[in-house]
Image: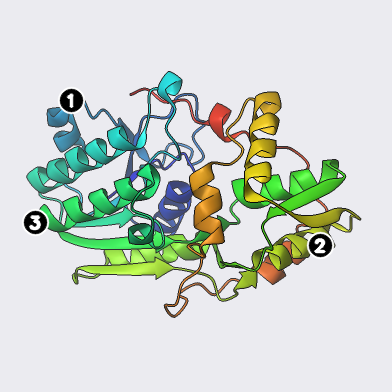
Amino acid sequence: MHVVTGAFGYTGRWIAHQLLEQGEKVRTLTNAVGRDDPFDGQVEVHPLNFEDKAALVESLRGADVLYNTYWVRYNHQSKRFDHGIATRNCNIMFEAAKEAGVRRIVHFSVAHPDQAPGWSYFAGKVDSEENLKNVGISYAIVRPTVLFGGGRNVLVNNIAWMLRYLPVFGYFGWGKYPIQPVHVRDVARIAIELGAGNEDITRDATGPETYRYKDFVKLIRKSMGVRRIVMPVPPLMGWMAGQAMGLFLKDMVITRAEIKGLMQGLVASDEEPLGVIKFSEWIDGKGDEIGRKYHNDLKERTYSR
């Protein structure tokens, strides 16, 4: 039996799908409110309640592997989540998994978290990785770059939405920094393969193609068949434009940490890519449909604490 946190969400959903296809029994721990069940009852559902460790232990008991996709994208006090809370909650989950006798944890981190220690998102990822390594249980740490595919595609879809409905798209600085997108199905497969092993390991999960960011945006534009100005803007101006757009959309369009991480090349890897699905081939068949509707990340993430 495998436990997947957030199987009604994005990455967790595709891990659960692939496990079910392999004939495995799957349980999910979720604190998301109002999500539809995409598995027609095939996945056993338990609450993800970090305030009740005893219940968390029981929800994990009997599991061979725990796939932990839980995290929060940004600090948002009115929504009652931040990176400090997420770090603490991950540690509670790791300890509960050990107490429950779980054989192995596959934990989702982010590419190059140690290269941005001053930003709370990355610092929290580093702390969670260290906590896992010290808890005394077999582990694999998966570090994806930028995910695409699988329906949700927040980053790619919202870039496409802006290209579709705005006359100008600005990329930060000169746009020469690398981006290496990876399909969510590849990430799910990588996670399951690592879950089957016993070696304590940390691996980047990346796709087979690397782009300069400005070329990545232009490829999306080309696939859509739209004529839009794509041009460099100062990073501060781009962030301010994102803030203004966020007020209109009632969403967090982009954070300063995300801009800095992007411009420092943290969404690409020097490791051999484990993904096989090419972004160029995927986007070529999605241009007519992608970006029709804005994906509001903040509205879609309604949590109980």
Mark 2 crowd level (few <14, some 14–19, many ≥20, 10 Å Cα):
some
Secondary structure, mark 3, is loop
Residue under label 1, please give it: 52
Q: Position of residue 218 (x, y in %)?
A: 78, 63
Q: Is residue 22 visible?
A: no
Residue 197 located left or right of residue 96? right
Frontmost residue, 271 versus 97: 271
Mark 3 crowd level (few <14, some 14–19, many ≥20, 10 Å Cα):
few
Q: CA distance from mark 2 to mark 3?
A: 48 Å
For badge 2, the amino acid type reads: Ser
Residue 50 located left or right of residue 142? left
Q: As displayed, is residue 115 above or below residue 102?
A: below
Residue under label 3, please give it: 136
Residue under label 2, please give it: 223
Q: Position of residue 161 (x, y in %)?
A: 76, 44
The image quadrant of residue 90 is top left
Q: Residue at x 38, y 28 (%)?
A: 81
Q: Position of residue 2 (x, y in %)?
A: 28, 51
Q: Residue at x 21, y 36 (%)?
A: 59
Q: Earlier in the sequence, mark 2 or mark 1?
A: 1
* C-beta proximity under 8 Å, tags 2 and 3: no
Q: Residue at x 58, y 53 (%)?
A: 150
Secondary structure, mark 1, is loop
Q: Earlier in the sequence, mark 3 or mark 1?
A: 1
Furthest-right residue in this view: 227
In front of the other: label 3 or label 1?
Answer: 3
Q: As displayed, is residue 168 above or below residue 262?
A: above
Q: CA distance from mark 2 to mark 1?
A: 48 Å
Q: Residue at x 31, y 45 (%)?
A: 124
